[in-house]
Image: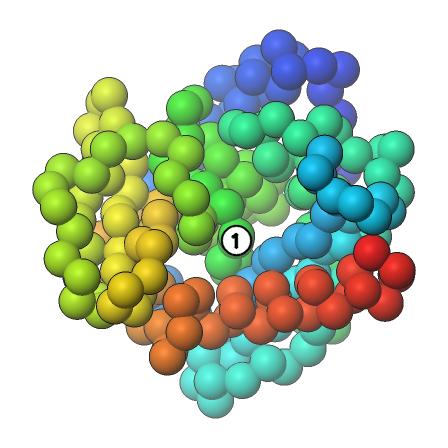
Amino acid sequence: MLSFPRPADVREAAEIQRALRGRVILQGDPRGVRYLAALDASHPTRFSRVRGPSVAVAVLWDRVEGRVVEVASASVPEDELFPYVPGFLSFREAPGYLAALSRLSRVPEMLLVDGMGIAHPRAFGIAAHLGVHLDLPSIGVGKTLLYGRPEAELPQEAGSAVRLMGQEGQVGWLLCSRSGVRPLVVSPGHRVGMGESLEFVRSLLGKTHLPEPLRQAHLHAGEARRRLGG
């Protein structure tokens, strides 16, 4: 597994993002993917009452059978984590994800990441960063809008979506995954087209807020953190 850069500070981190964002490819159709890895993490924040390591989880998901094949996790000591700064999540969470991915028995065909793709102030969120780093197709699915503005009001019908616009054009989608809940932010990370990213995430929706593979990753990350006492 390729080593991940550890910047000295936020300025250097921004320089790394700007240097790498030109490698992002916004083309590709993941409909033929069978095995994907859904990535989520549970880690302490400045508001946490209980301190401890960050826990990253990779859930290998079989799209044909609609089930979890394998779960791998990794922890990173708190004193080794990059500071929590919005827009720089990849430097905090990616080392744990890479360690978890290396423990899967097979290499996934693509990544579904809890975070942003190009819907990011420097067009290089964690899904884009991991996709470029591993040269794998990747899509970001975020629960909170970090960057961009919706082109129109989002209908509250499950499956509805509107374009999310940045300064230079579309950066993703707002997706109503379920009526009455906060919309998801869907954005391509690497080697996936804009429209294809939306349709792929739609194909993974179930009866809950998150796409099912990411829901499973979220549950396993929380359980792994509890086992460590966090």
Above or below, 151 against 141 in this view is above
Name the residue type under label 1: Val
In the rendering, at what x and y percent does residue 10 appear? Answer: 64, 16
Task: Identify the secondary structure beneath mark 1.
Answer: strand
* Residue 229, horizontal then vertical, whole percent: 88, 60
Q: Nearer the viewer, residue 105 or 61?
A: 61
Residue extending farthest to the bottom is: 65
**Residue 3 on image: x %, y %:** 76, 37
Q: Identify whether 52 is placed above or below 32.
A: above
Q: Is residue 32 left or right of residue 40?
A: left
Q: Identify the residue at image location x=52%, y=80%.
A: 62
Q: Residue at x 13, y 57 (%)?
A: 155
In the figure, residue 56 lies in which quadrant? bottom right
Q: Quadrant of residue 223?
A: bottom right
Q: Residue at x 79, y 60 (%)?
A: 225
Q: Is residue 172 left or right of residue 140?
A: left
Compared to residue 182, the image places residue 71 above or below, namely: below
Q: Classify residue 28 as left or right of residue 157.
A: right
Which residue occupies the foreground of this view, 217 or 136?
A: 217
Give the residue furthest to the front: 49
Tell me where residue 146 appears, x and y as whole percent. 41, 34
Q: Using the image as rendered, state which of residue 208 and residue 128 is in the foreground.
A: 208
Q: Residue at x 33, y 61 (%)?
A: 181
| Mark 1 closeness class: few <14, some 14–19, many ≥20 residues within 10 Å | many
Q: Is residue 123 left or right of residue 98?
A: left
Look at mark 1 in the image and give the residue it sits on: 113
